[in-house]
Amino acid sequence: MKEIDFRLLLEQLPAIVWATDLDLRFVYSRGAGLAALGLGADEVVGLSLSDYLGTPDPADPTLAAHLAALGGVPTVYEHEQERRVYRVHVEPWRAGGAEIVGVLGVALDITERARAEAALAGSERALADFFENAALGLQWIGPDGTVLRVNQTELDLLGYTREEYVGRHVADFHVDRDAVTDILARLGSGEAVDAWEARLRARDGSIRHVLISANGLWEDGRFVHIRCFTRDITDHRRMEEDRRREDLRQHVASLAHAAAHEINNPLAVIYGSIDLIARTAAPEMQARIDACREAIARVADILDRMNRLARLQISQGWPADLPPMLDLRASSASPAPERDTPNRPRR
């Protein structure tokens, strides 16, 4: 009865069990796993292992494992056949003592597990590729502020190598360190940060304007790390600044035109009055009257230039002969780009 039960157990076991003699010729093969290979119980009995494999090459993994078992060395390996994946264990077959009389083998079908592992590995590769090549800068920051991981986009933005960046405190790369301390405290208390505008210091000392969104990863109440997303808005800020300066120039030009118009009318009255006075003035007053006329002419020339300036488009060339007081280009010139001293990596 026990022999029958054992045979039924082997036939229904979701695996393949076999034995070979010293010539690696099958003497036994059972197990429910044979069906997946299109084989029945003991169907391969009498075949040599090399005939079954279709190769006598001792370097073949299956043949090599059986040869090792004949030498007393058990082996575990994975084998793929008929689109199925098996975990195989072969060991010496010792009959009634230490003498090796063949090889015993067991193969478990691990196809589903192998597929799941392959899918998981593929997902991890895809996630790693997404992290590394995302359009946004990405980094993981530890609870203490240490950079744990960073993608190439963030590194390219600031000009650092991975070795120079990872392992340092994130505040080392920020212009406003106090703000970083506050943000880390908020994230550590469970808050999220969205579109925080910050200034990052690049390796060459230049300043990059960015928007940062971040949240914390928590597992079983434990703060694991911060997930930080960085979007570069430096060009956008520069365009906004250019637009602001353009608006300022247009506004100043409009003021210049209005001022010239308002001053020109009373100036004409003054000039006419000087002419009337000159007709009846004593000869000794003529020098003073001429000086007044010259002063009025200079003012009129300045007003004429102001009017010409107001009519110019800002995008066009500026007159080279503007007096300093009317040089709107100089008065609204762009400030020098923000820079900082080069931030060298700590040794």
Image: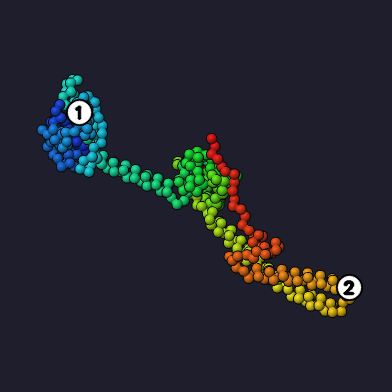
On screen, 67 above or below 179?
Answer: above
Which quadrant of the view contains residue 85?
A: top left
Q: Would residue 122 appear left or right of 342 to someone viewing this image? A: left
Q: Would residue 15 appear left or right of 325 to someone viewing this image? A: left
Q: Position of residue 326 (x, y in %)?
A: 69, 64
Colour mapping? rainbow
**In front of the other: 162 or 79:** 162
On screen, 70 above or below 156?
Answer: above
Does residue 157 appear in the picture of this structure?
yes
Three-letter amino acid code at disc 1?
A: Leu
On screen, 141 above or below 62?
Answer: below
Q: Which residue is mark 1?
A: 67
**In front of the other: 157 or 300:** 300
Furthest-left residue in view? 46
Numbered tag placed on residue 284 in the rendering: 2
Q: Position of residue 190 (x, y in %)?
A: 51, 46
Disc 1 packing (10 Å; few <14; some 14–19; many ≥20): many
Three-letter amino acid code at disc 2?
A: Glu
> Could you tell which of marks 2 and 1 lies nearer the N-terminus?
1
